[in-house]
Amino acid sequence: MKVERKKKRKFKLNILFFLPIILISAIGVISLLSTTVQVDGSFGDMEIVNKQLIFLGIGFFLYFLMSVVDISFLKHWQLIIPIYISTLLLLSAVLIFGPVINNVQRWLVVGGIQIQPSEIAKITVIFTTAGIFSYREKYREWILFLISFVFVIPIVILIYLEPAGSMSILTFGIWFLVAFTGLSNQLRNTISLLVVTLLSSTFLLVTITGNWIYALLTLLGLVIAIFAYYYRNSWRTLIAISVVLGIALGSLSLLIYEGVLRDYQKDRIVAFINPSENRGDIGFNVNQARIAIGSGRLWGKGFGNGTQSKRDFLPEHQTDFIFASFAEEFGLAGSIILLGLFSIVVFKGLMVAVDNSGNLFIAMIIIGIIMKLALEIFINIGTNTGIIPATGIPLPLVSAGGTITLVTLFSLGLIQSIMNSSSTSKSKEKIIDNF
């Protein structure tokens, strides 16, 4: 007779995962505090620092709370549907009741606190997509892929209408990465994705730059498609669809660029291609961020000694361009430490996903949270350094912002919960009695 006794679920703290989160949060507070330093060395208005400390306190409470919750119940549609509908209602309320701030409607103001539903929407997309793919044993995966696509489109459209083009693209990207994880035969899917990307990007790059050298991407895409088409017979249908889809998306991208994108969004793309262009505000923000980062050199100018932010040359130095402000004062050394801490969190999260690869729902949740975090880091720092077009994506746990801080710590708490669950399952005590 075999008797299995399970240990009760207990709170456990993975130091390798939790400590970098604490340190990143501390760096964020220090960076914000440094932006308040006046010329005489005294501290100015501390409101933004105090608010961030409050949000961090609430966020870590959510982290600990979620770390003791079994998240497997999230895959049930009875919970996913209310979360999804509530998110749609919040996004709709922003367009109806949200105040216009800097010519956009992205927040709801409740009791003097700004709430950004688009940040909540990213987590909703992860939950919804993972929940849909939890039915993969009952339904074909491509049907589930299509269903998840239908669910994400209303969210993306509502976010875009705020307007928040970069946030809508990020949300769509998170959905795609999570859904892509749920598909089988990843080698075939990756090659298919590469073909679509090469063929579709050609049209847009040629239009923006006027340089036909980018047409070579089409040739490369077709070569890969032909090779894959004859590599395996079972791939032929998907590869053929990929070629058609790539051309269709490329043509659609032209229509979107010319007829849908607003002028400021086109300006960001132009500034990315030609950062020295300074017509109006084009390229100014990125140039100032580069100056701030470069002036920090190896060790930085020291706490509170950043000139770009103090003299308001660096715009949004407490939110979108917080990394440039930090790099100016703490230099390359400080930047490497910050990136190292982020890397530990991302790497540890991916390792947890690998450990839970046997549970598709859990693995997709982890991949979604980690990819969300990694994309936000890449986009924010990429914007600050000029390697991607300027966007309004804050740096998690570093930039000032209540909603993104709460959502980030809440989602990381889910990963801590999965770690605890995995640890508990591995340490089950089994007593075997022989009669």
Image (cartoon, rainbow, N blue to C red):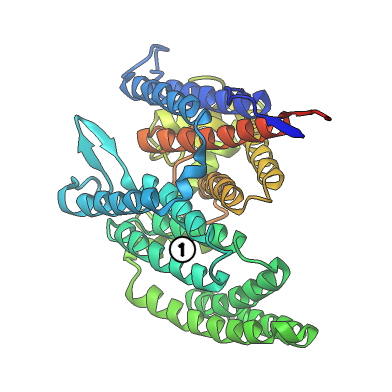
Quick check: 1 above or below 258?
A: above
Residue at point 52%, 22% (across, down): 26
SS of the residue under disc 1: helix
Drawn side of residue 245 relative to residue 90, left or right = right
Name the foreground residue: 132 vs 197: 132
The image quadrant that residue 266 belongs to is: bottom left
Toward the viewer: 432 or 172? 432
Residue at left offset 59%, top offset 37%: 418
Q: Residue at x 33, y 72 (%)?
A: 260
Q: Is residue 90 above or below residue 158?
A: above
Instruction: Residue at the far front: name it.
Output: 435
Q: Position of residue 324 (x, y in %)?
A: 52, 37
Instruction: Please name the residue that numbered disc 1 is placed on.
Output: 269
| Among the 4 quarters of the image, the one containing residue 148 | bottom left
Viewer-side residue, 355 vs 412:
355
| Residue 426 % position (x, y) | 72, 33
Residue 367's x, y, as percent? 59, 49
Say whether residue 311 is visible.
Answer: yes
Figure label count: 1
The answer to whether any part of residue 284 appears in the image is: no
- Residue 184 vs 27, above or below: the answer is below
Q: Is residue 359 left or right of residue 112?
A: right
- Amino acid type, label 1: Ile
User: Can you give x and y, in whole percent of width and height, for residue 205 in the image?
Assistant: 54, 75
Q: Is residue 113 left or right of residue 429?
A: left
